[in-house]
Image (cartoon, rainbow, N blue to C red):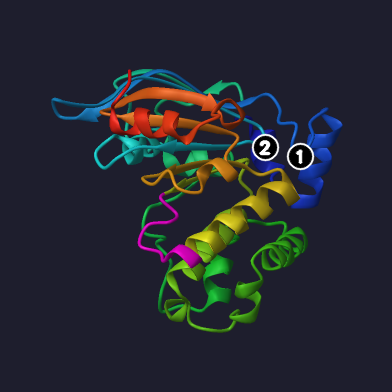
Amino acid sequence: MSQEKNEDCGQSAITMISKYRSAGLTMNGRGTSMLKISGLRAGYGRLNALRDIDLEVGKSEIVFVVGPNGAGKSTLLKVVSGLMKPWAGQIEFENEVINGHPPERLCREGLVLVPEGRSIFATLSVEENLALGGMGRKDKSVLQGDLEHVLDTFPILRSRYKGVAGHLSGGEQQQLAIARAILQQPALIMIDEPSLGLAPLMIDEVYASLKALNEKTGMTLLVVEQSTARILNLADRVNVLRNGEIVLSRKTSEISDRKILEEAYFGYVE
């Protein structure tokens, strides 16, 4: 990304919405490609964990990648976020090839990862955790507005603002991790298994917050999950990853029967 873009990162969520609309995008209409992965291969030693992955995420979309344990889901996010180098293939973010870019550069350019397990600072307060999200920003007046927007989107964080983060429930901690990522001013947030270890009611809360975030700000989301439950009500597109390969990639509007998704997930069809 250009130096000019890196310096002009002080854009509030409201300004971001205006930008989408002025570009001819709507909150639900979805726009042009933001992330495009072509022929991606990666692995560990001799183990080929990802095989010729093709995947695309459009602006303002919520795209899910689902699959069983060991399918390669977390590996995919590690490669895209710069934590692992791909063996082959190409990754484009906002029309620029980002293969080999370090994670800190990608984060500055708007590609932010919320890792599996939430990774909050349990001994710090909610306020301090959120402050870490905006620590590298110089636009303090805009940052304050973004913080208010985050607290409106995740009202539980406002009510627990001065409390210790480690005292939050699992679902509340997940919301905190997502809120902290938002304050880094991402163009796209990647979330690794947000429902991991959560009770069903907490999963519903987290998913509702993701839906609200997307609808209010047009935030683009790439979400990795093991479970297929609930995702059809949230996703614009679903990709099923099994044994390192995408075996199904469809818009949710094209999935008329959940059985299609389940058969791809469990390997009953090719």
Q: Is mark 2 on a helix, strand or loop?
A: loop
Indicate the quadrant where residue 79 lies: top left
Amino acid at the residue labelled 2: Ser
What range of the chain is rendered magenta?
193-201
3 within the magenta span:
no
Query: Which residue appears at 50% of the width and 32% of the height?
Result: 257
- The label shown at residue 58 is none
Residue 56 in view (yes/no): no
Give the residue number, with chain letter if any, for mark 1: 27
User: Horizontal and vertical percent for residue 66?
Assistant: 40, 38
In the rendered image, residue 28, in percent from the top left (x then y), is placed at 74, 37
Q: In the displayed image of the protein, which residue is found farthest to the bottom?
A: 163
The quadrant of the rendering that contains the C terminus is: top left
- What residue is pinned by disc 2? 60
Measured from the top left, where is residue 163 in percent x and y? 53, 84
Quick check: 159 above or below 67?
below
Badge 1: residue crowd in 10 Å (few <14, some 14–19, many ≥20)? some
Q: Residue drawn at (72%, 60%), measured in percent from left and top?
A: 146
Q: Is residue 77 left or right of residue 75?
A: right
Please check the rendered image and state whether residue 198 is part of the magenta-colored stretch, yes or no.
yes
Q: What residue type is labelled 1?
A: Met
Nearest to N terminus: mark 1 or mark 2: 1
Looking at the image, residue 150 sits to the left or right of residue 97; the answer is right
State yes or no: discs 1 and 2 in contact (Cβ < 8 Å).
Answer: yes
Q: Residue furthest left?
A: 46
The residue at the point 43 percent across, 56 percent down is 195
Secondary structure predominantly adopted by residues drawn in magenta = loop
Residue at 45 percent of width and 54 percent of height: 194
